Image: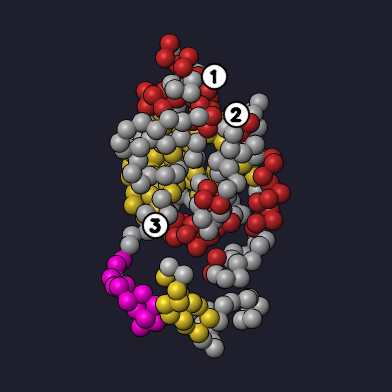
């Protein structure tokens, strides 16, 4: 038992049922430097290659829309620039990562605060770091059913990575429901937010983000667009098609917040329909 956690004190490695090597220790360091000798002993073929990865890459996908790619995590965050403020869409993984996103935005947009943070749904790869954006002048755009969960998450401690803990602040929310879309706009930009989680076969409440000026739809993880070939998709992807059709949205490009590795930069309605026709043959006639 170390620092309240149960950790192993002996490791064994077997090959085809035969014992190959054993490693034991009597002291556990929770913040060690990389022990190259130990790793080499455990895995003789291991080779240490020092690399420096870039956390963020940015792409201006349309006027007043900036995409942030989290290179290590295969997630994307969208930033919409309005006349006097920013609106951020998604806060993946943990507060440590999102703190770096905040730092990047403060550097790139020094005179524009983040007024809104919009979360497609509650899963950690989309909302795990939201607490880093909970500020007195920032409103969290979500659904009614997620508020209690986010309030609990906001007060939680990170015992393994204390740097991920943030000072609790009051959670201020704007909610979107299935029968009441939310439109946020000024002279520079506009986003219309729809809720249609019941159609997704993924979560009960899910937000879609539509930018009418740029003719772009930004969704979480309901649809994918592989670089090569067509992947047959089902109810999740069909929910995206259904929203576009039911709301009569003019969509030229569909961006997702996950994934981006081995994916097209964006998908089109043609790509979406091609991925659905096997499971929804009626789409061939449209």
In the depicted structure, whether residue 115 falls above or below residue 153: above
Above or below, comparing residue 211 to residue 45 in the picture: above
Q: What residue range appears in magenta?
A: 34-52
Name the residue beneath numbered marker 1.
246
Residue at position x 58%, y 42% in the image: 121
Residue 5: x %, y % from top left: 63, 76
Name the residue at the right extreme: 148
Q: Is residue 42 magenta?
A: yes
Secondary structure of the residue carrying tag 3 is: loop
Report the quarter where the C terminus lies: top left
Real-space CA distance between mark 3 and mark 2, rounded to the nearest whole angstrom: 31 Å
Q: Label 3: which residue? A: 72
Label 3 crowd (10 A; few <14 / some 14-19 / many >=20): few
Circle 2 SS class: helix
**Residue that badge 2 annotates:** 199
> Can you give x and y, in whole percent of width and height, for residue 146 in the image?
67, 44
Q: Main secondary structure of the magenta part?
A: loop
Disc 3 to disc 1, C-alpha distance: 36 Å
- Residue 211 in view (yes/no): no
| Residue at position x 31%, y 38% in the image | 227
x, y percentage for residue 232? 43, 30
Earlier along the polypeptide chain: callout 3 or callout 1? 3
């Amino acid at each position: 038992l170390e620092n309240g956690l149960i950790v192993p004190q002996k490791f064994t490695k077997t090959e085809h049922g035969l014992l190959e090597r054993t490693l034991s220790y009597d002291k556990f360091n929770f913040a060690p430097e990389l022990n190259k000798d130990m790793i080499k002993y455990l895995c003789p073929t291991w080779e240490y290659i020092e690399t420096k990865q870039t956390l963020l890459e940015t792409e201006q996908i349309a006027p007043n829309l900036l995409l942030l790619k989290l290179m290590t995590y295969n997630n994307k965050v969208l930033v919409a620039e309005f006349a006097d403020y920013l609106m951020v869409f998604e806060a993946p993984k943990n507060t440590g990562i999102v703190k770096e996103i905040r730092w990047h935005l403060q550097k790139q947009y020094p005179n524009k605060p983040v007024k809104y943070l919009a979360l497609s749904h509650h899963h950690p790869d989309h909302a795990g770091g939201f607490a880093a954006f909970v500020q007195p002048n920032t409103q969290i755009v979500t659904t009614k059913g997620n508020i209690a969960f986010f309030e609990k998450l906001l007060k939680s401690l990170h015992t393994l990575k204390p740097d991920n803990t943030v000072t609790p602040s009051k959670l201020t929310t704007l909610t979107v429901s299935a029968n009441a879309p939310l439109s946020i706009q000024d002279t520079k930009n506009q986003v219309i937010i729809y809720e249609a989680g019941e159609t997704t076969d993924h979560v009960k409440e899910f937000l879609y983000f539509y930018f009418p000026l740029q003719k772009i739809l930004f969704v979480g993880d309901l649809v994918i667009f592989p670089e090569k070939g067509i992947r047959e998709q089902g109810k999740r992807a069909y929910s995206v098609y259904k929203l576009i059709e039911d709301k009569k949205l003019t969509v030229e490009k569909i961006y997702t917040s996950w994934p981006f590795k081995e994916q097209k930069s964006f998908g089109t309605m043609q790509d979406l329909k091609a991925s659905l026709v096997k499971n929804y043959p009626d789409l061939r006639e449209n």
